[in-house]
Image (cartoon, rainbow, N blue to C red):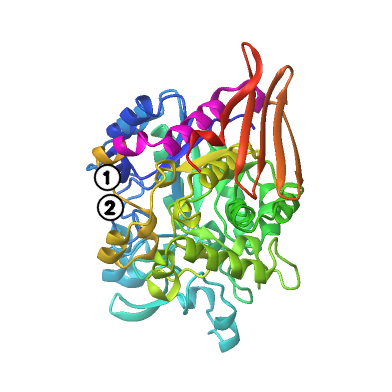
Amino acid sequence: MTHGPQLITYADRLAGDLPGLRALLDGPLAGAFGGVHVLPFYPPFDGADAGFDPRDHTQVDPRLGTWDDVRALGAGREVMADVIVNHVSADSAQFRDVRERGDASPHAPMFLTLGAVFPDGASEEDLARIYRPRPGLPFTVMTLGGRRRLVWTTFTPDQVDLDLRTPQAWEYLTAVVDALTAGGVTMLRLDAVGYTGKEAGTDCFMTPATDAYTERIVSLARARGAQVLVEVHGHHTQQIEIARKVDLVYDFALPPLVLHALTAADLEPLAGWLAIRPANAVTVLDTHDGIGIVDVGPSDLRPGEPGLLAPEKIDALVETMHENSGGTSRQATGAAASNLDLYQVNCTFYDALARDDRRYLLARLLQLFVPGIPQVYYVGLLAGSNDMELLAATGVGRDVNRHHYTDGEVADALARPVVRAQLAALRLRASHAAFGGAFEWDLDGTRGCLAWTAGDERAVLTFDVADASFTVHATGPDGEEAVLTDAAVAP
């Protein structure tokens, strides 16, 4: 897969708005990224879930720009945007009409209630079986047309789940895909699609209905010239299965495996994953969500199947991350903060590695050399630390890794050696012909080698996770030479 690296960012938190983001990509970040994933820019981009609760999924929030700005952003690069498949804002025009008119609203079939999935009632066993990434049951009591109902709200009470069994829901989703692709978006990320297939008698996660809905959206996207990335956290075997059916999946197992390798000096679990992982993947270290843990562990969804990391190693990794962050990630994770995600640690990747520039840069190089499309989160690009002030202001755990950068902070970060070295590595990954060729790897003990070869072109990363030493060699006009070493950052 020869796609260049992509930046993942909120337009407002990095550059103020969409024109500002384009100026940054065309200016100091030029040559580093072949694409950009702009996190939700729909009204309201600053809602209850940072844009993942759209009131109108077919519009650009005017505070960020226009569809013309999105199209301009796509000049010469790929643009990815989110299709929020599972839910819409409880404040959307459609759901407000349902609140007022109940079943008399033409939009009523579009939204899920407990009775829609369990028309004959749900037993205690039925309810206990439902999979949810947060504690408690996924229902909120609301009054619809004067009648008290249990509305299905998988994530928060502000996000009302869609009923994808209905034509109304598909009219809505088709309009969303049409608006995005007409606006210059060429890659669609399906957010929370794993939760769409609610069926009685199942755990309501990744059911056969989910597969059917995913295939239908993939067909919609491909007919309009777009590729689809599916976002699912779960057992690693699920990612392998999903990858066979869609254009792209996330490699959510990579971040904890890289962290384990660099904190425990143990490459064996990473080697096991490299041997079986799908190549049609988007690789990440951190994202707008936390650092996933469920992706490398055993899962109730796959009883009896081991994870990529043994439970005791996962426990040790999580504790190490908390220690490395000076305890700040502990304050942002689980019962310490809202958004009680059961499957992630809320922390910047830089803090998870104790702000060790060498280990951090090696982690980024490992990501860039593993097959797939590398996506780099804006806070990670700037080697950002946990934003405890924002966490204190909002009480939302994931906000610890969602800093609002000023222009001055961006300029200061771009001058840091660890950030300059990341940009050099990204420009190599974006431009060197070797990455369009064949990949080979060898991991032995604490040492490893990842290499790409295309004819006479070659790029090689050699490293040792014990001391975070590394060298990148690449062919150039004068033959193969070292183009980046651990000397780029202080030990």
Residue 16 seen anywhere in this rendered image of the structure: no
Measured as percent of width and height from the top left, residue 342 is found at: 51, 70
Question: Does the segment drawn in magenta span residue 347?
Answer: no
Q: Name the outermost residue toward the front.
A: 491
Query: 267 above or below 416?
Result: below
Which residue is under mark 2?
44
Question: Does the segment drawn in magenta span residue 424?
Answer: yes
Q: Name the outermost residue toward the bottom.
A: 124
Report the magenta residues as a range.
Answer: 411-436
Instruction: Locate the N terminus and report the quarter of the image it occupies.
Output: top right
Residue 83 seen anywhere in this rendered image of the structure: yes
How many numbered marks appear?
A: 2
Distance from disc 1 to disc 2, alpha carbons, whole Å, reads 6 Å
Which residue is under mark 1?
61
Q: Residues within 10 Å of mark 2 (few under 14, many from 20)?
A: many
Q: Secondary structure at mark 2?
A: loop
Measured as percent of width and height from the top left, residue 97 is found at: 28, 64
In the image, taking residue 76 as reference, residue 13 lies left or right, namely left
